[in-house]
Image (cartoon, grey):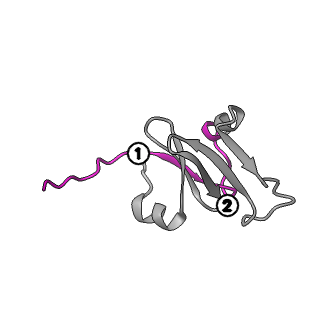
Amino acid sequence: MSKYRKKPVVIEAFKFYVDNMPDWFMDKVTTNEVILRNCNYRRFDIDEAYCEIQTLEGVMIGRGGDYIIKGVNGELYPCKPDIFEKTYEEANE
């Protein structure tokens, strides 16, 4: 069996309900590809906030503190912090 190494790819990401929501994320909110739930900082804690992200595999849930990743084709998907930190490192461009 052949072995393969994943190509290094630089992605954009932010921590949902922790970091400021970037324009590329808010554009998906505007087009209803992302639905924000319990995202009023005055009313809801990080444990209550979540978003529904429409993906090719169906709707995925991003919870407060999860990373939201913008993939190489502009697709969005959530990633748990522990997996994100094992998989990605900051790219200093």
Q: Any mark on residue 75, and which?
A: none
Q: Any mark on residue 10, and which?
A: 1
Q: Magenta span has 29?
A: no
- The percent position of residue 43, horizontal first and vertical second, equals 86, 60
- State yes or no: discs 2 and 1 in contact (Cβ < 8 Å): no
Name the residue: 66% across, 54% down: 19
> Is label 2 or label 1 in front?
2
- The percent position of residue 13, horizontal first and vertical second, equals 54, 49
Q: Nearer the viewer, residue 11 or 59?
A: 59
Q: Is 63 on the left or on the right of 91, as rendered? A: right
- The percent position of residue 76, horizontal first and vertical second, equals 54, 43
Name the residue: 66% across, 48% down: 52
Residue 47 figure quarter: bottom right
Total number of numbered discs in the rendering: 2
Q: Secondary structure at mark 2?
A: loop
The secondary structure that most of the magenta stretch takes on is loop
Q: Relative to residue 56, is residue 45 depicted above or below?
A: below
Q: Secondary structure at mark 1?
A: loop
Name the residue: 63% across, 41% down: 25
- The percent position of residue 36, horizontal first and vertical second, equals 73, 47
Name the residue: 42% across, 58% down: 88
Residue range (magenta): 1-25
- Reading the image, the residue beneath label 2 is 64
Which corner quadrant holds the C terminus? top left
Which corner quadrant holds the N terminus? bottom left
Disc 1 marks a residue whose amino acid type is Val
Q: Relative to residue 79, is residue 22 depicted above or below?
A: above
Furthest residue to the right?
43
Disc 2 marks a residue whose amino acid type is Gly
